[in-house]
Image (spheres, grey):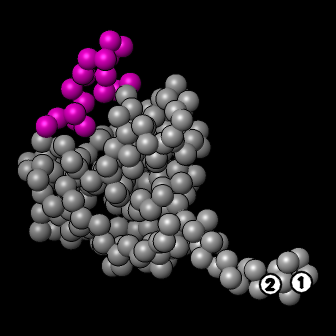
């Protein structure tokens, strides 16, 4: 699979309130037995979205006005807990393309980057303004600009931060290390031949 640079991502957003939202809340452990990651989207935040009998708890993700949202907004230390790769996979398979939060757990952030999901950090006051704008009009467009480290929402521009190496990888189209390695196959073969391994 060839990679491509990502400079901006746009779409509507949804705010999931709460600090320290861990990977077990994002995707409960019993769903890790899946054969492929493709089926994880429906189980995103399952235990806070559904009762034991499968009936809805009327979580914000299930409200009609937020269907199709592509930008997930949350608070501090998002993705903490166990390092399960299934958490960002579930977020991606649900349809989210970027995450804005106060801060991120390191391994979760890395797993998101590998999947091509940018994670940008924004101060609490600005996130609250943006969450209020989204609540007022769920169709509000949000633009995550990685090149300029800004988020544009409801005619306001908010500054964000991002791990420098991750930003560099998005702009260069090198977020997936396996793809990067495969793209250099000819060079690797040449070195292997020179060293007598091929």
- Which residues, given as a range, are shown in magenta? 47-64
* Mark 1 vs 2: CB contact within 8 A: yes
**Residue 20 in view:** no
- Main SS category, magenta section: loop
- On the image, the x and y values in percent for residue 54 come to 31, 17
- On the image, the x and y values in percent for residue 169 come to 50, 73
Q: Mark 2 = which residue?
A: 191
Q: Which mark is residue 108?
A: none
110 lies above or below 24: below
Task: Find numbered disc 2 in the image and state the secondary structure of the residue it sits on.
Answer: helix
- On the image, the x and y values in percent for residue 5 come to 41, 76
Quick one: label 1, few (<14), some, or many (20+) residues within 10 Å? Answer: few
Residue at 39 percent of width and 50 percent of height: 92
- Answer with the quarter of the image where residue 18 lies: top left
Q: How far apart are labels 1 and 2 at the CA level?
A: 6 Å
Task: Name the residue at the right extreme.
Answer: 196
Q: Mark 1 = which residue?
A: 195
14 lies above or below 150: above
């Amino acid at each position: 699979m060839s990679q491509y640079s990502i400079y901006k991502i746009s779409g509507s957003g949804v705010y999931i309130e709460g600090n320290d939202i861990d990977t077990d809340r994002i995707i409960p452990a019993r769903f890790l037995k899946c054969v492929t990651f493709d089926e994880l989207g429906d189980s995103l935040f399952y235990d806070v979205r559904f009762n034991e009998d499968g009936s809805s708890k009327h979580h914000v993700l299930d409200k009609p006005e937020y269907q199709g949202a592509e930008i997930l907004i949350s608070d501090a230390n998002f993705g903490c807990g166990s390092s399960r790769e299934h958490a960002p996979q579930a977020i991606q398979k649900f349809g989210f393309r970027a995450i804005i939060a106060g801060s991120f757990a390191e391994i979760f952030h890395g797993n998101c980057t590998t999947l091509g999901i940018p994670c940008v950090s924004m101060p609490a006051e600005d996130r609250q303004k943006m969450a209020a704008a989204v609540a007022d009009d769920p169709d509000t467009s949000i633009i995550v600009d990685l090149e300029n480290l800004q988020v544009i929402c409801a005619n306001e521009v908010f500054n964000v931060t991002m791990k420098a190496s991750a930003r560099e990888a998005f702009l260069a189209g090198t977020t997936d290390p396996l793809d990067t390695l495969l793209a250099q196959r000819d060079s690797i073969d040449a070195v292997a031949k020179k060293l007598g391994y091929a």
